[in-house]
Amino acid sequence: MSEGAPGAPEMSVEEFEKLSRRAPEPVRLEFIGGKVREKPPADGTHGQIVMWLMRRCLERRADLWLYPTCGLAIEAYRKGRARPGGDSLTSTAVEGTGSGVNGRSDGRRPARRFPMSATTPAVPPPAPTVIGVPAPQEDVDAIVAFVAGVQEAQLNADPDAFLGGFRADAIWTTAHGKRLTGLPEISAFTRKVLPPQADSPVIATYTADLILFIRPDIAAVKIRQRPARRADGAYLDEIFHGQEDPAELMAAHPEAVPGTPTYVLAKDDGVWRIAAAQNTQVLDVETLTAG
């Protein structure tokens, strides 16, 4: 570490970036005014705000995406490193590695968005069907944003962002029937299986299809999960549409089989989180071929 007169930087930018790369998760460091400081972890309320903003960005500028995980090169001569709550950027602005907007200042993988194509039009997804007890539109919007946040966390293979959406006592059953009870079990499983998906050629979109408000603070959410190619955003499950017997296609292309997760969300202190979740693959022929 460099030493100097009072008021001099505590270290060089290069030294800071080496330190930041060695920082264990979930520690996140900033370098502002020549001083190192830890970025406080986001709470549930902050996460809800980011997800709400993400939804609004999509509605108004489909070519922009709200990235909640990018580092920025700031200050004169780009000598500072900061972690804002979110950056509204085009998908190309976060490609590559390095410092600032065009990469993460800590050397970690930059946030990424799959490209749009003819099968993924640049328009907001359809509004979900809402049933059950009366609920304010702000709760509907918050749940839609929550589901969009799940998609973003999965796309960027970000365990911290994904796990932030669970209650401590949540239960989760995977699509293959593995039951996980409590956040520690869910966390251990997620940190094992999610990071390796960062370079997968297949990603998934998540859309809130139906919201049942069981009580004003409890909602069951049906989600449409569609696999897509990361390279161009083309939906893979379209190969099943209109097929009388898709069995051979399903066996040959298991990565193209969509999902139909169910989330039971609870609202605690104004924040929606998963209390229970069940991931299910769509194996029903009628549902699979109807699209």
Image (cartoon, rainbow, N blue to C red):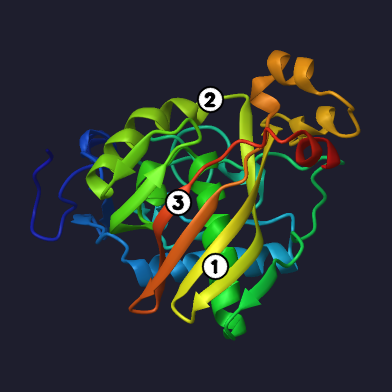
Which quadrant of the structure image shows residue 17?
A: top left
Is residue 77 or residue 276 the one in the foreground?
A: 276
Q: Is residue 50 visible?
A: yes
At 56% from the left and 24% from the top, the residue drawn is 200
Q: Which residue is mark 1?
A: 143
Please tell me whether mark 3 or mark 1 is closer to you in this view.
Answer: 3
Pointer 2 with pointer 3, Cβ within 8 A: no
Is residue 146 or residue 178 the one in the foreground?
A: 178
As helix, strand or loop, the secondary structure at mark 2 comes to helix
Q: Point out residue 167 in the picture as x, y percentages from the top left corner.
A: 31, 60
As helix, strand or loop, the secondary structure at mark 1 comes to helix
What's the CA distance linking mark 2 and mark 1?
28 Å
Is residue 288 or residue 237 the one in the foreground?
A: 288
Name the amino acid type tagged 2: Asp
What's the CA distance linking mark 2 and mark 3?
25 Å
Could you classify mark 3 by the number of other residues whose Cα lies within 10 Å: few (under 14), some (14-19), or many (20 or more)? many
Q: Is residue 242 left or right of residue 158?
A: right
Q: Point out residue 230 in the picture as x, y percentages from the top left corner.
A: 66, 31
Does residue 125 lie above or below 225 as drawn?
below
Q: Is residue 107 visible?
A: no
Q: Point out residue 138 in the picture as x, y percentages from the top left corner.
A: 57, 81
Name the amino acid type tagged 3: Ala
At 33% from the left and 79% from the top, the residue drawn is 269
Does residue 234 lie above or below 153 as drawn?
above
Could you classify mark 1 by the number of other residues whose Cα lies within 10 Å: few (under 14), some (14-19), or many (20 or more)? many
Which numbered tag is attached to residue 277?
3
Which numbered tag is attached to residue 199?
2
Name the amino acid type tagged 1: Ile
Which numbered tag is attached to residue 50?
none
As helix, strand or loop, the secondary structure at mark 3 comes to strand
